[in-house]
Amino acid sequence: MLFLIFVVNDDAMEYIADRITIDEKICNGKPTIRGKRIAVQTILEFLGAGESAEEILLQYPSLEPEDIAACLRFASDMMNRSFVIKTVA
């Protein structure tokens, strides 16, 4: 079974231009941090596994504390939106 998710409310999130980049040529269009090949999902998975922001910054020295905060804000904003899930073929 395949599911498609459609975002119902697609108002632009201002901070995306500063910290979160979505480019179909980078990481297959996944949200990344400042155009780097570091996906927001990767940072969220590290945080979910219990790593601290400081530990992540040591592993990714090109990141800044504001990048991690932007990942959390992005995830929070995505969960604050309305979605419609439809079954497809």
Image (spheres, rainbow, N blue to C red):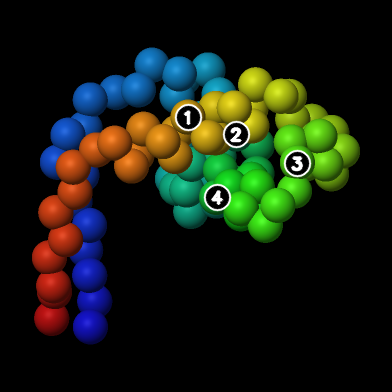
Residue 52's disc number: 3
**Mark positioned earlier in the residue sequence (1 or 4):** 4
The crowd level at tag 2 (other Cα within 10 Å; few <14, some 14-19, many 20+) is many
Does label 1 or label 2 sit earlier along the sequence?
A: 2
Residue named by callout 4: 41
The residue under label 2 is which amino acid type? Ile
In the shown orientation, is residue 11 left or right of residue 24?
left
Q: Is residue 89 above or below residue 53?
A: below
Mark 1 closeness class: few <14, some 14–19, many ≥20 residues within 10 Å: few
| Three-letter code, disc 1 | Arg
Mark 4 to mark 3 CA distance (whole Å) = 15 Å
**Residue 84 shows in this picture:** yes
Q: Disc 2 to disc 4, how far (Cα)?
A: 10 Å
- In the rendered structure, the answer to whether residue 79 lies left or right of residue 88 reads right
Alpha-carbon span between mark 2 and mark 3: 17 Å
Query: Which quadrant holds residue 24?
Result: top left
